[in-house]
Image (tube, rainbow, N blue to C red):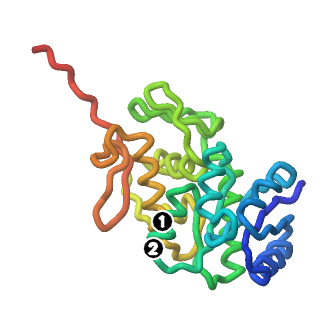
Amino acid sequence: MMKKRILVVDDEPSISMLIEFNLKLVGYEVQCVFDGEAVFDVLPQFRPDLIVLDLMLPKLDGIQVCRRLRSQGNLVPIIMLTALQDLSDKITGLDNGADDYMTKPFSPQELVSRIQAILRRLHTLPANTEETIEIGPLELRPAQREVFLHGNPIELTPKEFELLSFLCQHRGKVLSRQQLLHGVWDYHFLGDTRIVDVHISHLRDKIEKNARTPEYIITIRNVGYKLLEPPVKKESFA
């Protein structure tokens, strides 16, 4: 079996070396680069399964790298590293395509655990993968990892697909943010639940008629979220 490849992008050599050492210990192939532009130089040959990406980088910062990757249709999972404590910086990373973030200083072992969780989920199909899930006009095809709304394809990131799939499998049930972190991100520890909120927001933007008044993904105040089948609107025969 081929080793999974991790691209580490950080302009601090000591941090890159620490991450590389810990990733190689558990069997990953690792390549390190030290600025944002270098990411696009190595992508065609290295073809990473996941990118560990620092926010503050020379030439292109982490946000610009994320945005450029996603605009090119590249859905490789990204964990963003940031030394900034401001919540808005973390949310900006998620809004531009990052799957997760960690704040420096961080535990190398926790970073490895998060990488393992993301890759494990990415390559594990949901139960009943041959069955198409239909919720009103929303159609989910797990085996093909495809989503259609009113027959039109909806482009989701891998994490958005997993989140929607998990909600569909538990339709009608209230799921706490921590349950979603466990079930979708595979985190067996307390994680930052704002990651869930941002991905829910992205899903709503793509599948709801009006993300401010959602019909599919309902917020349960102070608890979490629930997926419902939208009510069928009766035709008027005036």
Foreground of the two, 174 or 6: 6
Q: Residue at x 58, y 62 (%)?
A: 63
Q: Residue at x 30, y 59 (%)?
A: 220
Residue furthest to the left in view is 238
Q: Quadrant of the C terminus?
A: top left
Element marked by disc 1: helix
Percent x, y for residue 43? 80, 53
Foreground of the two, 4 or 127: 4
Instruction: Examine the rendered structure and indicate whether residue 208 appears above or below residue 151.
Output: below
Residue furthest to the top in view is 237
Foreground of the two, 170 or 210: 210
Q: Is residue 217 left or right of residue 114?
A: left
Q: Which residue is mark 1?
A: 91
Percent x, y for residue 109? 71, 80
Q: Are marks 1 and 2 in contact (CB under 8 Å)?
A: yes
| Tag 2: amino acid | Leu
Percent x, y for residue 96? 54, 56
* Label 2 environment density (alpha carbons within 10 Å; few <14, some 14–19, many ≥20): few
Q: Quadrant of the N terminus?
A: bottom right
| Tag 1: amino acid | Ile
Q: Quadrant of residue 209?
A: top left
Residue furthest to the right in view is 1
Q: Residue at x 49, y 72 (%)?
A: 192
* Label 1 environment density (alpha carbons within 10 Å; few <14, some 14–19, many ≥20): some
Q: Is residue 161 left or right of residue 65?
A: left
Give the spatial CA distance, label 1 vs label 2.
6 Å
Element marked by disc 2: helix
Q: Is residue 185 left or right of residue 220?
A: right
Q: Which residue is mark 2?
A: 87
**Dot label at residue 231:** none
Instruction: Examine the rendered structure and indicate whether residue 12 appears above or below residue 204.
Output: below
